Image (spheres, helix red, strand yellow):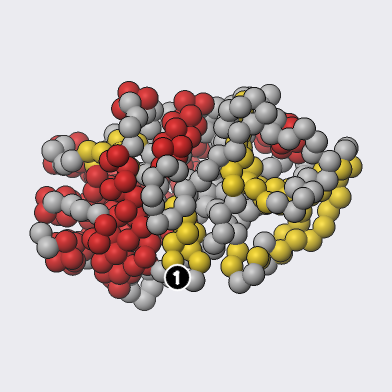
Amino acid sequence: MRFSSIVFSGALLSRTAFSFQSGSSAHSISRTAALRSTAVTEEAVAAPKSFVGSKLNDLDIANEALAKFYDDIEGVEIEPTTGGVNNIVQYITLPSGERELLRIYNNGCDSMRVQWEHDILKQLNTFDLSFCVPKFLESKEGTTMVRLSNGADACMCELIPGGLPKLTAVEDIGRASGELNTALTKVDIETSRCNVAPYWKMWDVHHAVTRESFEEEMNGPHFDEVRETADRMLKETLDIVDRCEGKYQSLPVQLIHGDLHYDNVLVDEGKVTALLDFEFAAFDWRAMELAICLSKYAGEEPDAMPYFVDFITGFAKTGKLTKEEAEAVPDLINLRILSNIVYFVGRHQAQEDNISSITTRIQNYEKRVNWVKENSDAIVKCIVDEMGL
């Protein structure tokens, strides 16, 4: 696959073709966005200052960010990464040939959340882990995050080798995920600094959404083309919220990654090289981490259960749950899946994203929710057996 790259040379921009392949594996990072246009879109011009978008539509902003880390950006190349729906993340190639990552956050200009992520990763980078986590570079100001003129925060990261695994290396991803879940209990950080809501507080997963505004949006014209699915997913969402607000409040709580799935993992030759994107780290039920990980495999064709078995087998080597937690996992998987619907509705309402981000996904989410409900007993049995509960 080939993409366009942009070379900064003073005020002159030139386009060249560039492949992201390096040897046999692609350097990749999840929750990022492909560059599709060099023009500032009409949507970006009309949006409020806090709107950043997930596409690099304003080269001046990227230029501004780079200038906060480097004295001279002459000849610096910028290329889009693949995938992603939240933040702007671009490959940076310096004149020396060294490659790094530029990230411009699209989180409503929430600097507290950015600093939270950076402080967690600073500690994790001192731990003896079997994989890498993002390591942020210092700006010319001596900070790892900088504020841009549009209100967004930006940072630079070291580039970690590896490619997206998709449906490969499942057991080793499970092992690494369990290792991280255990390691996060050793991170020393004030709980009061966390401004990321636990998943069961569904109406806090995005600052712009409420139960009332969510119901209104789901019943509104944006979902008419998927009306039956939208109606069922609205009911499922309200039901899971009511269930989790009462049934699982005694489950153990700890710091978790909060968005750990195979699109936030890099692998090389079947082994995990990195776990990425700690933007949604939060104090939540310990079992949510496993549920989030498994949610991405739910509904995979022709049969998702082998992926569940492999992942749980790996997770059980380095992580632990109680039997009560194991029995909650199916509901927690669907809590995660359904929270995506609420989250993307919130992003639409905050003008951070287009409603198509959810209307094009909602039928897939329904498929995954139904698969989990149909296979809940088998999921619980696998966890109980592998962990010896």
Side (left or right) of 154 relative to 362:
right
Give the percent coordinates (x, y) of residue 370: 28, 60
- Callout 1: helix, strand or loop? loop
Q: Please name the residue shown 54% across and 62% down the image.
A: 162
Side (left or right) of 335 relative to 36:
left
Please name the amino acid that badge 1 sits on: Gly
The quarter of the picture where residue 307 lies is bottom left
Q: In which quarter of the image is the C terminus?
A: bottom left
Residue 387 visible? The answer is: yes
Q: How many marks?
A: 1
Q: On screen, 274 above or below 74?
A: below
Give the percent coordinates (x, y) of residue 23: 64, 70
Front residue of this view, candidates 37 and 32: 32
Front residue of this view, candidates 381 and 334: 381
Residue 343 visible? The answer is: no
Q: Please name the residue shown 59% across and 67% down the image.
A: 25
Q: On screen, 48 above or below 199?
A: above
Give the percent coordinates (x, y) of residue 380: 17, 61
Q: Please name the residue shown 67% across and 28% down the image.
A: 140
Give the percent coordinates (x, y) of residue 224: 46, 48
Q: How crowded is mark 1: few (under 14 residues within 10 Å), some or many (20 or more)?
A: some
Q: Please name the residue shown 69% across and 42% down the image.
A: 56
Q: Mark 1 points at which residue?
A: 270
Side (left or right) of 258 relative to 64:
left
Front residue of this view, candidates 28 and 378: 28
Q: Quadrant of the N terminus?
A: bottom right
